[in-house]
Image (cartoon, rainbow, N blue to C red):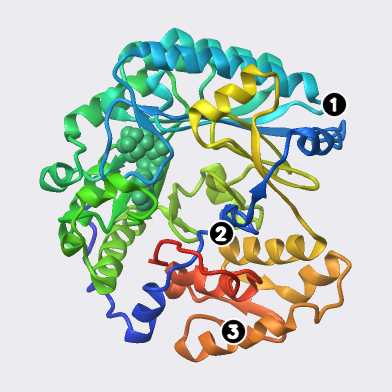
Amino acid sequence: MLDSTAVAPKAARPSVPSSWLAQAGRTLPRYTSYPTALAFTAAEDDAEARSWLAQIRPDQTLSVYTHVPFCKRLCWYCGCHTSVFHEYDRVRTFFETLKREIELWAAAMPAHAGTQHLHFGGGSPNALAPADFAELVAVLGRAFRLRPDAEVAAELDPGLLTHEFIDAAVAAGVNRVSLGVQTFDPDVQQKVNRIQPFEQVASVVARLRDAGLAALNFDLMYGLPGQTPENVAASTRDAISLAPDRVAVFGYAHVPWMKKHQVMIREEDLADAQGRWDQAEAADQELVAAGYVRIGLDHYARPGDPLAVAAASGRLRRNFQGYTDDPAAVMIPVGPSSIGRFGPGFVQNAIATDTWGRAVEAGHLPVARRLPVTEEDELRAAVIERVMCDLRVDVGAVCTDRGFAPDALDSCFAGIAELEPLGLCRLRGRVVEVPAAAARLVRTVAACFDAQLAGPARRHAQAV
Ligand SMILES: C[S@@+](CC[C@H](N)C(=O)[O-])C[C@H]1O[C@@H](n2cnc3c(N)ncnc32)[C@H](O)[C@@H]1O
Ligand code: SF4
């Protein structure tokens, strides 16, 4: 039972072995897919995507991801694909193209079992005008046959979330909202150009609940300039006081070579590996003391929440939106940069909004990159997903379930053997287990099963 008003007894934060901090500083993928999007290669046209789409079976449910690449403000830490708009005309043009894209995908679809998850991400889907967003939900619902019990989730920026938008979104069927909270500390907010007082978020939360919203997620961050374990703990307590159902705690990924505006954040203002660890630990202690269940690498949920239930029963999944209880094997990508998944492989829509728009206007599915997956990729993906979700994987069982010899991935145990003496995992037979204390470093264990890390140098964010 959650009690957000209780004052949590403060345990001393455990000290972290230096070998763990060295691992925490490694740059590794987030493993929201395997192979990762960096492995995708250019698509010549949309013929392959159409042939993959044609292989959807009538009994398969869909998941549809729609990306809205617009925001009213630019947060300096932002790693998302977005741009700031000043005139709504730009967003409206995008919206018209988006509807055309939805028609193209829907026309290319064979029979399927309907859509179980509709997810709006960005950017900020609430950059759309309330009536346009409501129309978008309806258009998608008709095009991909939304099932009556579907989850309809939207990531929204509380700083520009109007009451009109909330009412329109909930009336249109949105039943889960993720709010970007990040931090409530005014100095940190100043340092990252995201002013968002507690009262503003509290008022948005109250309105969402009044409108009848069923489920609320918060995103929190650590590792931002000016953050300390103390102010992360305080922000986490403030967040808990608003009683979200789920909380994701993301470590700031500083990748200025990819996201140029991050140069506004001075590297000397960023905490080192020990500091980042302590901040993540501070958030963790507050959430666990308030009754949230820790899930995978960086998520927390109330005990009865579907994500916690999925985690407890081994049904947790990991996809491009992070941890999910969505089992759909087919993901339809809508909007620039969106990633889709079909039986034979991954596709990614053109990243630049104008390139994406030109493809759609020419009547093409706007796919720009793709990756066919091999059976071995799928085997490695299954092992990586299980360890990322369950902190435990029976590698031999996954191999035999997929028609491989039980020893097919034994060569990966050399990497595991290097991590085991550090206390980051245990190997018993072919079962790999990550102790709860090392959950934050699970990506280092997952990386042992990644055949592509040794390939051409690729730059990811650091592991913790
Ligand atoms: C699309 S935004 C959420 C919706 C909305 N745009 C907002 O900011 O409130 C997705 C989330 O990604 C996280 N995020 C953004 N940039 C990040 C970065 N560089 N490192 C880690 N997490 C980041 C933030 O927690 C943010 O809430
Ligand atoms: S964090 Fe959210 S609101 Fe801020 S720039 Fe990124 S997508 Fe936009």
Q: Is mark 3 within 8 Å of ligand 1?
A: no
Q: Is residue 312 left or right of residue 217?
A: right
Circle 3: element type: helix
Calculate the distance from the C-alpha at mark 1 to the C-alpha at mark 2: 30 Å
Residue 433 vs residue 6: left or right? right
Q: Nearer the viewer, residue 425 or 292?
A: 425
Residue count near mark 2 (Cα–Cα under 10 Å), binned few <14, some 14–19, many ≥20: many
Where is residue 366? Give x, y as percent: 64, 30
Residue bearing mark 2: 31
Counting from the top left corner in percent of width and height, residue 40 is at 64, 52
Q: Earlier in the sequence, mark 3 or mark 1?
A: 1
- Mark on residue 110? 1
**Residue found farthest to the left:** 187
What residue is pinned by disc 3?
415
Ligand 1 within 8 Å of disc 1? The answer is no
Where in the figure is residue 92, as x and y percent of width and height? 45, 12
